[in-house]
Image (spheres, helix red, strand yellow):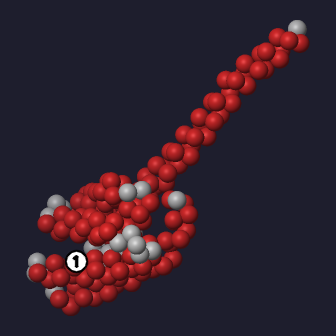
Amino acid sequence: MQLKVNQHVFRSLLFFIPLILLTGFLIVKTLKLWIFLGLCLVSGTIVFINYYTKLPFDISPVFFLSILFTSTHGFGYTVVFAFVAGFIPSIISGKGLDFDAFMYLGLNLLMNFLSLQLQALNILTRGVVLSIVYSLLAAIMSVFMGSSTSKEMLSMVLTIIVNLFYFLKLTNPLLMILG
């Protein structure tokens, strides 16, 4: 009788130990996916509110997070993130499908491609430099499309300040999470 109990316990352990290890592995692997999806949801909500309320400058963390995703997860995640968290919410906020939406998406992806080329710089330096370039190019393109120069210069400065805040305050904590 004692032998059967030990065999039963042994068989149970042979079944449950790999099951527990597999579950732990899946949790670790899917945790990054859940974090990615959560950041998509938070960013998408901010983009939606930003466009729905017609704020004159961008307060969303899309640019900041896309630079982080390019560094930690690769350019493919950034393409998905920029589309899901930036492009789609801006369209459904009532802004509509216009050239601006494609311009900002393309500019964001261009800056992230440049980020890949600047891997020698640390993420903070790279992010700050690319944020300034991104904001400057966005302002120039908006002025060429008929927007007021003074409005775009103010928007550029405010967007740079918002992105600097994100990069300076959130880069290290999020890098620990995104790993």
State the count of labels: 1
Task: Determine the residue located farthest toward the bottom in the rendered image.
Answer: 150
Q: Nearer the viewer, residue 22 or 97?
A: 22
Residue 117: horizontal and vertical position, in percent? 32, 69
- Disc 1 marks a residue whose amino acid type is Ala
Q: Nearer the viewer, residue 155 or 64?
A: 64
Q: Residue at x 42, y 56 (%)?
A: 73
* Nearer to the camera, 47 or 120: 120
Quadrant of the rendered image containing residue 18: top right
The spot of residue 174 in percent (x, y) is 51, 65
Query: Dot 1: few (<14), some (14–19), or many (≥20) neighbours within 10 Å?
Result: many
Q: Position of residue 71 (x, y in %)?
A: 41, 63
Residue drawn at x 11%, y 81% as measured from the top left:
144
Q: Is residue 120 left or right of residue 173?
A: left
Asked if residue 127 can be seen in this view, the reply is no
Image quadrant in which you'd find residue 66: bottom left
Q: Quadrant of the N terminus?
A: top right
Q: Viewed as shown, does residue 17 lie left or right of 127?
A: right
Under tag 1, what secondary structure?
Answer: helix
Residue sitting farthest toward the front = 120
> Would residue 134 be seen by someone viewing this image from the given angle?
yes
Instruction: Residue at 65%, 34% (x, y): give it.
Output: 20
Mark 1 sits on what residue? 138
Q: Residue at x 49, y 54 (%)?
A: 35
* Vertical placement of residue 17 versus 138, above or below: above
Outermost residue on the top side: it is 1
